[in-house]
Amino acid sequence: MSLTKKEIMAEVVRSGKDPTYFANKYAKISHPLHGLIPFEMYDFQHGVMNSFKDNRFNIILKARQLGISTTVAAYVCWLLLFHRDKNVLVVATKLSTAANLVKKAKSIYKHLPMWLKIASIEIDNRNSFELSNGSQVKASSTSGDAGRSEALSLLVVDEAAIVEGLDEMWAGLYPTLSTGGGCIALSTPYGVGNWFHKNYIEAEEGKNDFVPLKLPWNMHPERDGIWFEKETRNMSKREIAQELECNFNASGETVVHGDDLKRILEDIIEPRHCTGFDRNYWIWKEVDPHAEYLAVADVARGDGSDYSVCQIFNLQDMEQAAEYQGKITPDMFAPLLHQIGSEYNKALMVIENNSLGIGVLNRLEELEYSNLYYSLRSTHEYVDQPTAQAMGGIAGFTMSMKTRPLVIGKFEEFVRNKLITINSQRLANEVKTFIWHNGRPQGMRGYNDDLVIASAIGCWVRDTALTVNKREVEYKKAMISGIMKDNKTFHTRIEGQGGFVPPKKPKNNYVGNDGRTYDLSWIIKG
C-alpha cells in the first residue's frame, strides 16, 4: 500500500508519539512456525508498553513465553529510532541472553517500511548497533564494570532474578541513570532474598521508584485450564511456581519447600516480651515448671556481620519458646546463656564448639551450669558430664562438613512433617533465604543463617542424640529388670553341679545262704 507524503508524515509522527501504535502496526517478529509475522500485541502487552513510556523504572514479574522480551525489544527499537543520542544497555546473566534481545530489536528495525527508517544503521555488530541519529544499544554480561563509565538512557536487566551480584552491579549502574535514564527489570521468580525479589516487593509496598507489573500464565488470552494442565503434566511444583505462577516462595532452590515456607510465614506470631539489655531476647511461651527445655546457641564475635543466637525449644513438642539474636561479645554472652538456661528449668544447653564457642563453654563450666551438652569424641552420642569426664567426652556440639548436611536435612524433615513450631519472624526470614548453593545449604549472599543453624542443631539433638540416648537407657533398665533370682538348685548328673550325688558302687562279693562268699566281679562290666 503506497502512502502520500502527507500520510507518511502523519504515520511517522503518530508512531513517534505512541510506541504501542508503532509496535502493533509496523513491528514484525520471527515466529518459530509461521516465519516473519506482524507483532499483533495482546492487551496486557499494550499495558506493559505504555508503562515503559510513562514510568522511568519498571520491574516485571512474569511467566514464561508471554512475549515480554519481544515487547521490550520493540520498545527499545522505538526509543532508538525516534529519539536522538539515546544509550541503551541490555544486561543478563549470559551475554548470549542479552545479545538475543538486541538481535530482536535489530530485526524489528530491519523489517520496518523504508519510509519509516528515519535513521539508518551506521554501526552493526553482533552484540550492538548504532543509528545515524546517535542512538545505540549494546548487550553486556553482568560483569562488575558493565556500563559504569556511560550515561544510560535505559538499562534493561533480563532474567534479573538469576543474575548473581546484581546488588553490587546496581549500586554501580544507578548513578549512570541519574540524568533521567530509566530501567526495565524483567524475570521469572527464582526464590526470595535476591535483588529482583527485594525490589519487586518494595515496589509493591511503594518503598522504591519501580512500578511493579505481575504477569502470571493466565494473562495470555489463549491459555486456559486445559492448557495449564497439559503444560504442567511433567513439571514439579517448584517449576510450576517459577515458570508459570509468579510465586516467589515456591520457586528457587530454597532448602525448605515453598508450601512449607508459606505455612511458616502464615503461622508466625508476635512475641509476648522483647526484653534483655538490647531488647533482642524475644519470649513467646512462659516457663512451664513441669516441662523440659532445649537451648541451642551459636557464638559470633559480636563485631561482624554474624549474630550470636540462642533458640529455646520445648523438648516435648519442639515449639519455639524464646529466641535471642544480637551482636554481643562472647564474654557477655556466657552469663546471658546461663541466665536464659536457668530460667527455663536448667535447659539442656547445646553450644556449637567452634573457636568462639569453646570459650563460652569454658565460661559456663566456671559458672557451674549443670546441664551442658557433652558428646563422645568423634561421635554425637550424648552423655552426661561425669560420663564425659570418664570416657574423654567433649563439651558442645561439633559441626563438621560431614554432619552439616545431615543436620540441615533433619531440620527440613522436622519442618516438612510439622514436628517443629516456628514462632519467630526473624527465623522465618532466614528460612526464606536459606538455599542450596553449589550443593551446600547456606544463607543467600548477604543474608544470615545463624538462627536456622541453631534450630537445625536443636532438631538433630532432639531426634538423634537424646532419642537414642533415652532408648539406650530404657534398654538397660529393661535388661536389669529382667534379671531374676531363684533359690532353687538344679539337680543334674554332671559332677560339680549343685545337688550332684555320686552313684553307689555295686558290690563285687556275694554271701550265699550257706555262709560262703562268692566273687561276682566277672559279671559287672568295668
Image: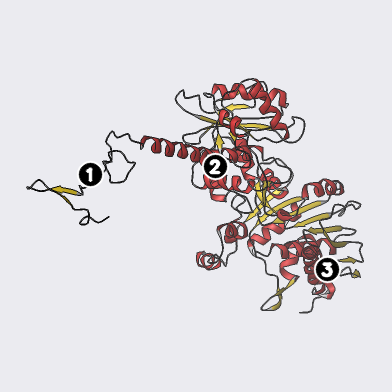
**Residue at image point 74% right, 66% down:** 23
Nearer-N-terminus badge (3/2): 3
Q: Kindly identify which numbered label has been placed on residue 264.
A: 2
User: For the residue carrying disc 1, how many other residues have a C-alpha within 10 Å: few (<14), some (14-19), or many (20+)?
Assistant: few
Q: Residue at x 75, y 36 (%)?
A: 305
Residue denoted by label 1: 504
Viewer-side label of 1, 3: 1
Q: Are marks 1 and 3 in contact (CB under 8 Å)?
A: no
> Mark 3 — residue?
9
Amino acid residing under circle 3 = Met
Query: Which one is closest to the eye, mark 3 or mark 2?
Result: 2
Q: How is the image coloured?
A: secondary structure
**As drawn, 43 above or below 173:** below
Q: Residue 20's quadrant in the figure?
A: bottom right
Amino acid type shown at disc 2: Ile
224 with respect to 395 (left or right): left
Q: Quadrant of residue 111?
A: bottom right
Amino acid type of the residue tagged 1 in the rendering: Lys
Q: CA distance from mark 1 to mark 3?
A: 141 Å
